[in-house]
Amino acid sequence: MNLLKKTIVAALPIFLLGGCVSTHQAAVDKGATCPKTGFLKGTDRLKTSDYEVAITGLGGGCNFGKDVVVLDTSFFVAVKWSKDMVDQPDIVSIPYVATILDEAGEITAHTRFDAKVEMVDGFGDSKEELRQRIPITEALTASKYKVVYSLYDGTNQDVTY
């Protein structure tokens, strides 16, 4: 391979990465902000006959692409065992959902996940990290989207967002 071809092949990843960075920076320079995120009121805590659960500590950020916003979020799922310690499992699976609402408040995605929480002496927590790709027509509309997280107990399918 001659020197010119080596230079082009070596520089290609830099150009591609630079395109992503410039797309994001251009969107931010125009005033684009991340979608709003939060926990759905009334579904951020759950109590069963076996345990109590809370989701807390929401954080994250986003990056803008040409026709997508990539949202990275994290939060904790904390569990307190309510029954006799003899019955406590080593790991508890806690279901939760992530719901994406568009500019009009319509649900565009509704996905169920399971946090695997390791229990020690009646307590446990799990840091959940999600990466969600949200198609958008232009970066400035991203802030009009909402991403809502909620614990799922099998009965809250028809809640109002």
Image (cartoon, rainbow, N blue to C red):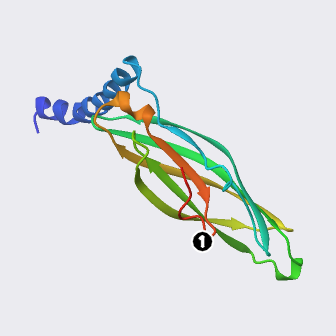
**Numbered disc 1: secondary structure:** loop
**Residue 152 to residue 160: above or below:** below
**Residue 138 to residue 119: above or below:** above
Which residue is depicted at the point 45% across and 32% down? 143
Q: How many marks?
A: 1
Residue 18: which quarter of the image? Answer: top left
Which image quarter is the N terminus in?
Answer: top left
Q: Residue 140 placed where, x, y %?
A: 36, 27
Is 82 positioned to the left or the right of 66 in the image? right
Q: Which residue is mark 1?
A: 154
Asked whether 20 or 132 is in front, the reply is: 132
Residue 153: which quarter of the image? Answer: bottom right
Which residue is depicted at the point 49% across and 53% down? 99
Q: Residue 154 placed where, x, y %?
A: 60, 71
Q: Amino acid at mark 1?
A: Gly
Q: Residue 62 placed where, x, y %?
A: 46, 36
- Few, some or many C-alpha atoms within 10 Å of disc 1 (few <14, some 14-19, many ≥20)? few
Q: Residue 93 placed where, x, y %?
A: 65, 71
Is 127 positioned to the left or the right of 2 in the image? right
**Residue 70 to residue 33: above or below:** below
Asked whether 98 or 101 is in front, the reply is: 101
Which residue is depicted at the point 39% across and 41% down? 104
Residue extending furthest toward the bottom: 87
Which residue is depicted at the point 88% across and 77% down? 85
Is 3 positioned to the left or the right of 97 in the image? left
